[in-house]
Amino acid sequence: MKEMRPTTGKVLLALFNILGPLEGKRFLDLFSGSGQIAAEAGKLGAEYVCSVESDRKRYAEIVKKAQKDVKCLCMDVRRAVSKFSKNGEHFDIIFADPPYELGWGNELPGLIEANCGIVADGGVVVFEHSEREDAKDMDPAKWCREDRCYGGTILTFYRRSAEL
């Protein structure tokens, strides 16, 4: 199991300041780890929050600490995204903080593009990654990209065009 690396306070604050008000929004936290991001989204008023973590021990800890209105799933992110897509579920905000430097910079954008229906019109995917790992572009006709750097951490925002 890869060591957990919770999002730092500085990055957490920046993330939620950039996202703005969460009331009425559906929020998905992929690679949930400690559940900190999902918990914060719930505290900030997101209408629906779902946490996905594949490690059973971490999942159990998230469930123990989670607010009762946070849905928690213990499954691989690929399976979860596919399941949401097949079920017609969508989210306004998807946050993904996978283990650094394991190839997710290439895989995650492709996974989201292949299942783009899970991102609501005008929704955003936020990918937290190391400065040593590039994040693949998504189709610029359908997605706007912006990177924000915080020390060695980068938040890549992919905003979905409302016309898809």
Image (cartoon, rainbow, N blue to C red):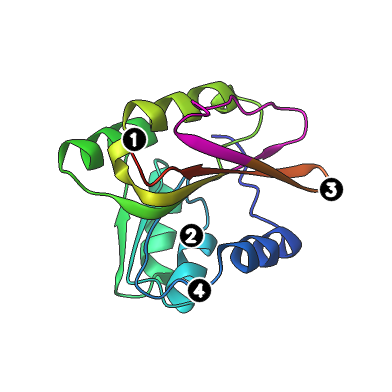
Looking at the rendered image, the quarter that the C terminus falls into is top left
Q: Residues within 10 Å of mark 4 (few under 14, many from 20)?
A: few
Give the secondary structure at mark 3: loop
Mark 2 or 1, nearer chain start: 2
Query: In the depicted view, which residue is nearer to us: 18 or 5?
Result: 18
Circle 3 sits on which residue? 151
Q: Report the side of 129 relative to 164 (left or right).
A: right
Circle 2 sits on which residue? 35
Is 140 in the magenta?
A: yes
Mark 4 or 1, nearer chain start: 4
Mark 2 and mark 1 residues within 8 Å of each other at the beta carbon = no
Q: Residues within 10 Å of mark 2 (few under 14, many from 20)?
A: many
Looking at the rendered image, the quarter that the N terminus falls into is top right
Q: CA distance from mark 2 to mark 3?
A: 22 Å
Q: CA distance from mark 1 to mark 3?
A: 30 Å
Three-letter code for the amino acid on which mark 1 is drawn: Cys
Residue 155, given in percent of the width and then of the height, sits at: 66, 46
Q: Looking at the image, is mark 2 or mark 3 nearer the viewer?
A: 3
Q: Is residue 29 visible?
A: no
Mark 1 or 3, nearer chain start: 1
